[in-house]
Image (cartoon, grey):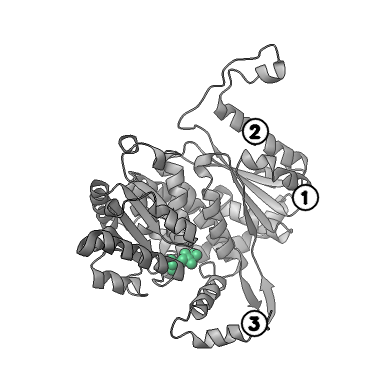
Amino acid sequence: MRLKVDYNNMLAGYSKAAAAITPQEIAALKDKAAEAFQFIAQNRGKGTMEWSELPYNQDAVVADILQEAKAIREKCDTFVVLGIGGSALGPIAVQQALNHLNYNELPAEKRGGPRVYVLDNIDPERISGILDIIDPKKTVFNVITKSGSTSETMSQYLIFREILKGALGEDYAGHIVATTDAENGYLVKIAAQEGFKAFVIPAGVGGRFSEMCPVGLLAAAVAGIDIREMLAGAAAMDKIASNTDIMQNPACLGGLLQYIAMQKGMNITVMMPYADSLRYMADWYAQLWAESLGKQYALDGKTEVFTGQTPVKALGVTDQHSQVQLYTEGPFDKVVTFLAVEKFRCDVTIPHGHEDIPAVGFLGGHTMAELLEAEMNATEYALYKAKRLSCKVTLPEVNAFTIGELLYFFEMQVSFVGALLGIDTFNQPGVEEGKVATYALLGRPGFEEKKAELDARPAK
Ligand code: PA5
């Protein structure tokens, strides 16, 4: 069950856009693209590209996850992920994609597994709000942090640990699962001290590339999602993305087209799923694209270069009625990527009615999936007519396999764009700066110098 891609609306000959990409522009980058491809081929599985092997090397980890998930499903009615950024956006996207859209509201017997919440923020109203709807005695908290020290996640951990201790006494440790680095950071030490079940985030798997390691797989397995199928989908996409002929390699070809579009001033990438199940894929993609490609470096050690494309999240059809006006008539600075679904898991037929009013009656007999598809094609056409660039990735169905394919597709694509740009795709110094400044502002020992640096700013 393969994803389908359609790049016609980015290519001269089909697209009428001034920025449409010509065969000559693609040909001119043949060597550069081959070098970028080689870079990935040589570095995959090593260092910060360890994530590329996640589809293959996790048999023992998957067995451990399934066993833990079974135990959690038996003892609990709620599973709460505590994490932020790459430790939350993958789990959110996958839960939304593969569970019933009202999963947490379903009666337990229909749901079949615990409710799953991902607390990806520290808003005090949200933190205390969750306490109104859970019973700590029947809840397992999964603390996820690669660095093992992110303030947001560790503060959540301290809060829920205290609550669990109050509710369960000495048994509280059985209600916390830690997912973190094998050696670095403080969570791994705390987990050993307190006796928490722990899962490892492999050293070379960065946050935004971590959905298909225990970061996302445990929450998925707890909800009954077939995690082996997800990994099989990723492996299938890896084969496709390993084709050395870029023109036959949709992940890298898409990356090359985005790269050329960026050189032509397309500084914004809009991710627009036409399916509620995929709406948070846009959030996951936004982080992947922004943190991976938004980089500053000194070319030849001197000239400052700033790279990246600003991701925008949109949802079809909802944002047709808000953002599409800008996409069709605003600045020529965007590439819109549609995420389409060929076959929805269910459909609803629009009843016949008001046939005496043709402007309403024409809807009767069509299905909502047909209407959604027509709306997406109409938006694609509106962009085409306005001479804008767009492309489309279609999932035959939304299932564990195609979601694995989709995640891996964009992970490979962003890595390829990063290699073309000659940047470090896998670091995030700008994010780290904010984390360190937070430590300094709240008085973490060892960050006194950073605090002095902050205090030296002009007074407001
Ligand atoms: O992609 C990344 O590496 C970041 O966005 C991190 O995921 C995020 O900052 C959370 O970090 P950690 O998992 O260390 O708590």
Residue under the point 33% across and 49% down: 78
Q: Which mark is residue 205?
A: none
Residue 301 numbered tag: 3
> What is the x, y in percent for residue 307?
65, 67
Q: Which residue is mark 1?
A: 330
Give residue 188's position: percent from left, percent from top. Answer: 31, 71
Left or right side of 169 for 89: right
Give 412 or 187, whichever is nearer the viewer: 187
For badge 2, the amino acid type reads Glu
Q: Earlier in the sequence, mark 3 or mark 2?
A: 3
Residue holding disc 2: 375
| Residue 396, above or below 41 | above
Q: Residue at 73% across / 55% down in the picture?
A: 333
Which residue occupies the extreme top position in the image?
Answer: 356
Nearer to us of marks 3 and 1 is: 1
Camera-nearest residue between 261 and 176: 176
Q: In which quadrant is the C terminus drawn?
A: bottom right
Label 3–label 2 contact, CB within 8 A: no
Q: Quadrant of the N terminus?
A: top left
CA separation in Å, label 3 and label 2: 49 Å
Give the distance between the C-alpha atoms of the residues marked 3 and 1, in whole angstroms. Answer: 36 Å
